[in-house]
Amino acid sequence: MADGMPLVWASRLLGRPLPERVTGADLIWSLSAAAAARGVPVYLVGGPPGVAEAARDALCGRHPGLNVEGVHAPPYGFETSPAALAEVRGRLVAARPSLVFVGLGFPRQDRLVAQLRADLPGAWFVGCGAAIAFAAGSVRRAPGWMGDHGLEWLFRLISEPQRLARRYLVDDLPFALRLLSGALLRRAFGSRSRH
């Protein structure tokens, strides 16, 4: 199971296709349903002010009984401020959630999870990118056909070019190209060595 389409495509090129693609935007709903059914406390971190609250309301509206212990939208650049980071840590530790959705985008969400895991060793952390904003309805998802063909990134780039151009075109594209070219080379040379 993978979120990004380059991983799905690379797995297909290597002849070992992944069983399915599951995005953070889909996972937030399914995991919230499971959390509601099992009484697992949830916490949301991310999004602009008010977005995490709107996501909480939407998730609780769809999944009655969901226990959202807290939401927090830390200010941009919080990770460079010891006081702001301490506030995020303090809120999470006080809430004691078992499932934490961290929607800050890569790599900020991954760095935050790495810093906070020791404080909540029994919690599951899910880096979910824009899933909190999607759940809140503040950011639109791509039409189904675009998502099915691996073009959700293009829809998002067109929707938010100033925010996402550098990330998608400068940071992500070279990684995707290396991954896919490596898979192509491995497929080409791997198949020759078997003959």
Image: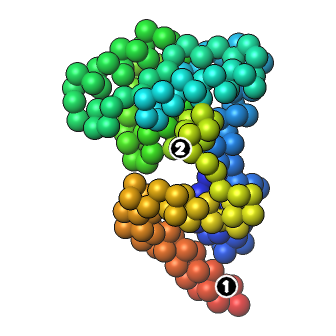
Q: Nearer the viewer, mark 2 or mark 1?
A: 2
* Residue drawn where x is 47% and y is 56% of the image: 160
Q: Quadrant of residue 187?
A: bottom right
Question: As drawn, is 19 to the left or to the right of 70?
Answer: right
Tell me, for residue 130, which label it has, or none. 2
Residue 139 appears anywhere in the view: yes
Indicate the secondary structure of the residue bearing disc 1: helix
Q: Is residue 111 above or below residue 93?
A: below
Residue at image x 59%, y 57%? 4
Q: Residues within 10 Å of mark 2 (few under 14, many from 20)?
A: many
The amino acid pointed to by label 2 is Ala
Depth check: give the residue in front, 188 or 168.
168
Task: Between residue 68 and residue 98, name the one nearer to us.
Answer: 68
Q: Vertically, is 145 above or below 83?
A: below
Q: What colour scheme governs how the chains and residues are painted in the rendered image of this protein?
A: rainbow
**Residue at left 70%, top 54%?**
21
Alpha carbons under labels 2 and 1: distance apart: 39 Å
Locate residue 54 relative to residue 113 in the image: left or right.
right
Pointer 2 or 1: first along the chain:
2
Which x, y percent locates residue 36? 73, 19
In the rendered image, is residue 124 in sight?
A: no
Residue located 64% across and 89% down the image: 192
Q: Quadrant of the C terminus?
A: bottom right
Q: At label 1, which amino acid type do we have?
A: Ser
For residue 139, the mark is: none
Q: Position of residue 60 (x, y in %)?
A: 69, 20
Quarter where residue 148 is shown? bottom right
- Residue farthest along the top direction in this orientation: 94
Q: In the rendered image, which residue does mark 1 sit on?
A: 191
Image position, residue 38 (x, y; %): 74, 16
